[in-house]
Image (spheres, coloured by chain):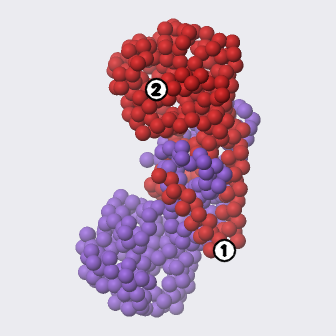
Chain colours: A red, B purple
Amino acid sequence: MIQTLAIVGVGLLGGSVAKAARAAALARTLVGVGRDAARLERALGDGALDRATTDLEVGVRGADFVLLAAPVLAIEALLERVWRAAPDGATLTDVGSTKAGIVRRAEALAAGRPLAFVGSHPMAGSEQSGYGAARADLFEGATVLVTPTDRTEPRALKAVTGFWEALGARVSALDPEAHDRAVAAISHLPHAVVDALMDAVARFAPEALEFAARGFKDTTRIAASDPDMWADIFLANRTALGASLGAFRQALAALEGAIAGGSREEIRALLARVKAAREALR
Amino acid sequence: MIQTLAIVGVGLLGGSVAKAARAAALARTLVGVGRDAARLERALGDGALDRATTDLEVGVRGADFVLLAAPVLAIEALLERVWRAAPDGATLTDVGSTKAGIVRRAEALAAGRPLAFVGSHPMAGSEQSGYGAARADLFEGATVLVTPTDRTEPRALKAVTGFWEALGARVSALDPEAHDRAVAAISHLPHAVVDALMDAVARFAPEALEFAARGFKDTTRIAASDPDMWADIFLANRTALGASLGAFRQALAALEGAIAGGSREEIRALLARVKAAREALR
């Protein structure tokens, strides 16, 4: 059991961890760290947090487990201060959507002061954001990717894996670079493509939007995601995203070529391949 | 009330019309026309149809209202035979996803033999297909676009509008070309983009698919649509789709440019604009 769990950033993910950790009695004391005291009040008021502070050092100082749940570039920027403030023996993890940059920074800091860090990425986001959208069951059945390297202490990996499993998640390990390539393909590419789709229709054919049906709405749901969070993600993972976008452009050109060529059979075969791939997802 | 409603093509849409028309007691007799007698048996067995035939002329001959519910290129190909077989005074409509080609063909036929035709497009599809997916409430609250022209008889427009409203739909009228541009933007472009997205990920990063979360699944749901139906749609509407794809490519290039340029504020502003557009959809 964790004595003091410090959660830095009490939004959708951090707030959901607080609620889920409370429900699972995973930590004796839950401490929230945020920039806005008024927003932290809500999590204190409903009992998800025991204490809250806007002072990062105060929040992290007595914690044996620290979760960084800020946007991805903010996590990178906070890491040095967290590293200095956390007590010896503390376990650190985060929820950043890209991992290579954060893990690289953490390992540089660990060369100076050994602390048990493993990167995490809970695949349990939402187009919603903020503590108001936090749910105790957000991680129930979700996948959390953890990103150990050959420098990761086994006890840190065990602690972080156990943490997410206690919140109901299934944990898989990937190295940070493989993680970033994978999420570029299944998360960042779809966001970029859907953002461009929504933008194109809203600018090119706004009068058509009144006829949009369920297919369009489901497809574009993720276009309502938090702009700050996604600006960070796109920047943090731009190399891997660029490679995914290249693959997408090729696939789109193949479909357009088949349509322009007018071969019904060629289009049909391509769409049948796509349908089979989609149906192979659970 | 319709005396004899002939439904040509008893799949998802035709079958749903049969069930909904039965539930609303909209027609005295419901006749289904299909290519496969065994498949028609099911709709006879559950009472959605009174009669079924694989002979188009036999099915259409005695009908005062004929609904063509085949894939869009098949409708164009069938129109001439339907025109010859339908009795004087019959009202004709269809469910084709593109309208300019069908309406043009119908108006050419009407120059030889006046029959009351108005094109329809119920925006109530699904990634499912076939009679097994048909539902009596498929049109409840759905939008049906009808596409009269200056050659359309007012009584035909009134009959077809009333038909869909009796099945629970909201009806809007657009001219056929405006319809095709609108659905290119809100339906055909999203399908093409999502097909390419699913194809790119399945070929470029198949190992990542095991980590796909709800966002990816919602976004790509329409990639499981019927390949035959969509090959037809892409071909039938390739001009308007090409224009929409051009707008999409511009929007994607703008987003990629902002990411490559590394300006967080530029990316954030673009994503905020996209979020606002998505949230403006009901």
Q: Is residue A280 above or below residue A141?
A: below
Looking at the picture, tell me which residue is in the foreground, B123 or B154: B123
- How far across and down, in percent of the image, does residue A219 sit? 52, 51
Chain of the residue displaying label 1: A
In the shown orientation, is residue B90 left or right of residue B205?
left
- Disc marking residue A163: 2
Quadrant hosting residue B105 = bottom right
Looking at the picture, which amino acid does disc 1 mark? Answer: Ser
The residue that mark 1 highlights is A263
Looking at the picture, tell me which residue is in the foreground, A223 or A268: A268
Q: Are marks 1 and 2 in contact (CB under 8 Å)?
A: no
In the shown orientation, is residue B138 left or right of residue A203?
left
- How far across and down, in percent of the image, does residue A210 sit? 48, 54
Helix, strand or loop at mark 1? loop
For image coordinates 54% across by 12% down, the residue present is A89
For marks 1 and 2, give the CA distance.
54 Å
Q: Residues within 10 Å of mark 1 (few under 14, many from 20)?
A: few
In the shown orientation, is residue B32 left or right of residue A191?
left
Whether residue B39 is visible? yes
Quadrant hosting residue A78 = top right
- How far across and down, in percent of the image, does residue B110 sit? 50, 86
Q: Is residue B184 above or below residue A49?
A: below
Looking at the picture, tell me which residue is in the foreground, A92 or A136: A92
Q: Is residue A38 above or below residue A175?
A: above
Q: Residues within 10 Å of mark 2 (few under 14, many from 20)?
A: many
Looking at the picture, which amino acid does disc 2 mark? Answer: Phe
- How far across and down, in percent of the image, does residue A205 sit? 58, 54
Residue located farthest toward the right when viewing the structure as drawn: B261
Helix, strand or loop at mark 2? helix
Q: Earlier in the sequence, mark 1 or mark 2?
A: 2
